[in-house]
Image: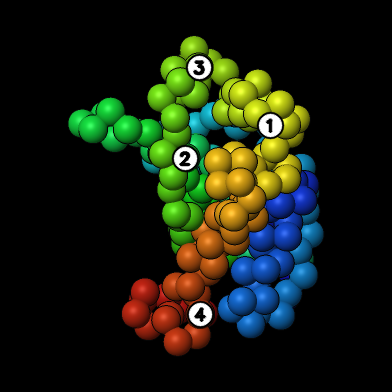
C-alpha cells in the first residue's frame, strides 16, 4: 500500500512510517509538498482539522496510486473559559471514496507569553526560536521537545495523531465505525 503525505517535514514522514509500523500496516510513505494557502498557525480546533483535511485531500490527489492521503496539522486549541491554550496535532486520513477519519495527539499548554505573541500574528516556530534559540525546532524535536527537555519529541505527537486517525480503519474496528470496504 502507498500512503501519500502532504509534507516533506522529516518528523511527519517518520511519524507516518512509525504509525504504520505500530498498526502492522505494510505500506510506504510518499511525501509531497503541502498545498498552497494553508494558514501558518491555525487558531481553534476546526481550523486545525480543516488544515489537516486540506492537506490529506491534496496528498491523495497528488499521488494517483496511493490508497490514503494523510495530512498532519498542528494548531492552537483555545479554552477561553479557562484562559488556557493548547498546542494540538490533528491527523486526517482520506481514502479514494472520500471517507475521512481523524486523530488527535495529546495536547500541551502554550505558555501565556508565547500565546500573546501568537495573537499578534507570529508563528509558533518563530516564537520558539526566539525564546530557545533553536532554529526550525518544528522539523526536529519540536516545541514539546524543548519544553520537556527531550523527554517527548514532536514525532511522538505526530505519530499518535496518525495512528489515532488510522484506528477506525483497522479490520477489527470497521464495523464499530460503520466503515465498509
Distance Cα–Cα, label 3 vs label 2: 14 Å
* Residues at marks 1 and 2, CA–CA distance in whole angstroms: 22 Å
Q: Are marks 1 and 2 in contact (CB under 8 Å)?
A: no
Between 93 and 129, the residue placed more toward the observer is 129
Q: Is residue 157 left or right of residue 9?
A: left
> Which residue corresponds to the image point at 61% horizontal and 46% vertical from the top-left?
149
Q: CA distance from mark 1 to mark 3?
A: 24 Å
Which numbered disc, 1 or 4, marks the residue closer to the eye? 4
Confirm whether residue 69 shows in the render.
no
Residue for badge 2: 87
Of labels 4 and 3, earlier in sequence is: 3
Q: Label 1, on which residue?
A: 36
Residue, far front = 149
Report the residue that reaches farthest toward the bottom: 172
The residue sitting at 53% across, 62% down in the picture is 160
Q: Earlier in the sequence, mark 1 or mark 4?
A: 1
Which residue appears at 32% of the width and 32% of the height? 84
Image vertical order of residue 69 relative to residue 168, above or below: above
Q: How many circles with numbers are drawn on the protein?
A: 4
Q: What residue is shown at x 77% (from left), y 47% (from top)?
A: 8
The residue lying toward the viewer, choosing from 77 and 61, is 77
The answer to whether 118 is drawn above or below residue 98 in the figure is: above
Q: Earlier in the sequence, mark 2 or mark 4?
A: 2
Q: Secondary structure at mark 1?
A: loop
- For label 4, the residue is 170
Residue 42 in percent (x, y) is at: 50, 32
Amino acid at each position: 500500500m502507498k500512503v501519500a503525505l502532504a509534507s516533506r517535514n522529516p518528523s511527519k514522514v517518520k511519524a507516518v512510517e512509525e504509525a504504520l509500523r505500530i498498526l502492522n500496516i505494510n505500506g510506504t510513505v510518499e511525501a509531497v509538498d503541502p498545498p498552497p494557502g494553508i494558514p501558518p498557525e491555525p487558531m481553534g480546533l476546526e481550523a486545525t482539522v480543516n488544515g489537516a483535511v486540506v492537506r490529506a485531500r491534496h496528498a491523495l490527489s497528488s499521488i494517483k496510486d496511493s490508497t490514503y492521503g494523510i495530512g498532519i496539522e498542528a494548531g492552537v486549541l483555545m479554552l477561553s473559559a479557562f484562559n488556557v491554550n493548547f498546542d494540538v496535532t490533528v491527523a486526517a486520513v482520506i481514502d479514494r471514496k472520500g471517507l475521512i477519519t481523524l486523530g488527535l495527539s495529546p495536547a500541551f499548554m502554550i505558555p501565556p507569553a508565547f500565546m500573546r505573541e501568537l495573537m499578534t500574528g507570529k508563528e509558533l516556530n518563530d516564537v520558539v526560536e526566539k525564546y530557545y534559540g533553536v532554529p526550525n525546532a518544528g522539523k526536529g524535536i519540536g516545541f514539546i521537545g524543548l519544553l520537556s527537555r527531550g523527554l517527548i519529541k514532536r514525532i511522538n505527537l505526530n505519530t499518535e495523531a496518525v495512528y489515532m486517525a488510522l484506528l477506525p480503519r483497522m479490520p477489527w474496528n470497521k464495523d464499530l465505525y460503520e466503515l465498509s470496504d
